[in-house]
Image (tube, grey):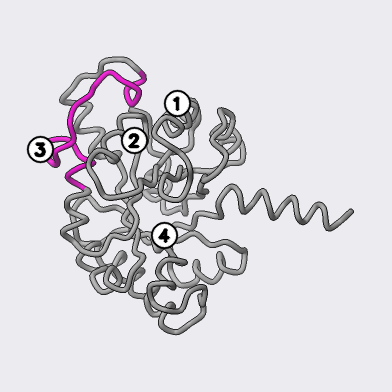
Amino acid sequence: MRSNLFQERLAAGEMPKGHMVWEFATRGMPRILDAAGLDFVVYDMEHSGFDLGAIADLLSANAHCRLTPFVRIPQDQYHFVARVLDAGAMGIMVPNVKNAEQARALVQYAKYPPTGIRGLGLGTAHNNYAMPSPAAYLAEANARTTVICQIEHPEGVRNAHEIAAVEGVDVLWVGHFDLSANQGIVGEFTHPDFLAALDTVVAAARTAGKVSAIQPGTPEQFQAWKARGFQVLSYGADFNLYRAALSDALARW
């Protein structure tokens, strides 16, 4: 199994550099991201038009890159988890995790026995079509598969400590727009209630020995949220960066 660069950066005390892809499912996209120096990428299935075929194509191209590929699945259902992992994802991001029971189920879906219930489809894309030694591969896959729970609702914030304490959960990732909307303060990212929620999630992750993450959209947000203690910051989504760069270039004409 390939190395998980996201995990390696964290183990070395470094901040992994990431990005999210919602729009550009081209065969060259993973190599572009790799050439930019990213450590990980999240391919989105929640808000994008990507079906499993598009995700499988991206993961196939990503197999030749060093950066670690994750997939945000649309819902916390077994078939989404198992299929993207079998296609070559090295971790899953799950939207709107609200409690520890939900988090435990996700870990079960993502991990092979005896830790979880993930079914065995060996020798396919996630093995580069070579049959591995089953016992050794299952143990290695369980160790290297990353489980990311998104905190996007006040209920998830209230239960953040319990979610973080679930064995097998690696990351609490704040979905900042959804969280602010569910708090009734959509887009108010300096509101005291929003900032208090951020601090709760960061503290919950730290207490459990896990990682807190968020995706800033501006350099100012990056610096502010890094200062609040987030250990992983994934910068922007593909379409936003492309639009901003093109708009900036046109403004200079």
The residue beneath circle 4 is 213
Amino acid type assigned to the residue bearing label 3 in the image? Pro
Q: Position of residue 216 (x, y in %)?
A: 53, 62
Quadrant the N terminus occupies: top left
Corner quadrant of residue 88: top left
* Viewer-closest of 185 and 248: 185
Report the magenta residues as a range: 107-128
Relative to residue 167, is residue 27 depicted above or below? above
Q: Nearer the viewer, mark 1 or mark 4?
A: 1
Relative to residue 242, is residue 134 depicted above or below? above
Relative to residue 29, is residue 235 depicted above or below? below
Q: Position of residue 108 (x, y in %)?
A: 17, 45
User: Considering only order in the chain, which callout, 4 or 1, is on the residue closer to the N terminus?
Assistant: 1
Left or right of 213 on screen, residue 168 = left
The residue beneath circle 1 is 60
Report the Cα–Cα distance between label 4 and label 2: 21 Å
Q: Position of residue 68 (x, y in %)?
A: 43, 38
User: Considering only order in the chain, which callout, 3 or 2, is on the residue closer to the N terminus?
Assistant: 2
- Rendered image: mark on residue 84: 2
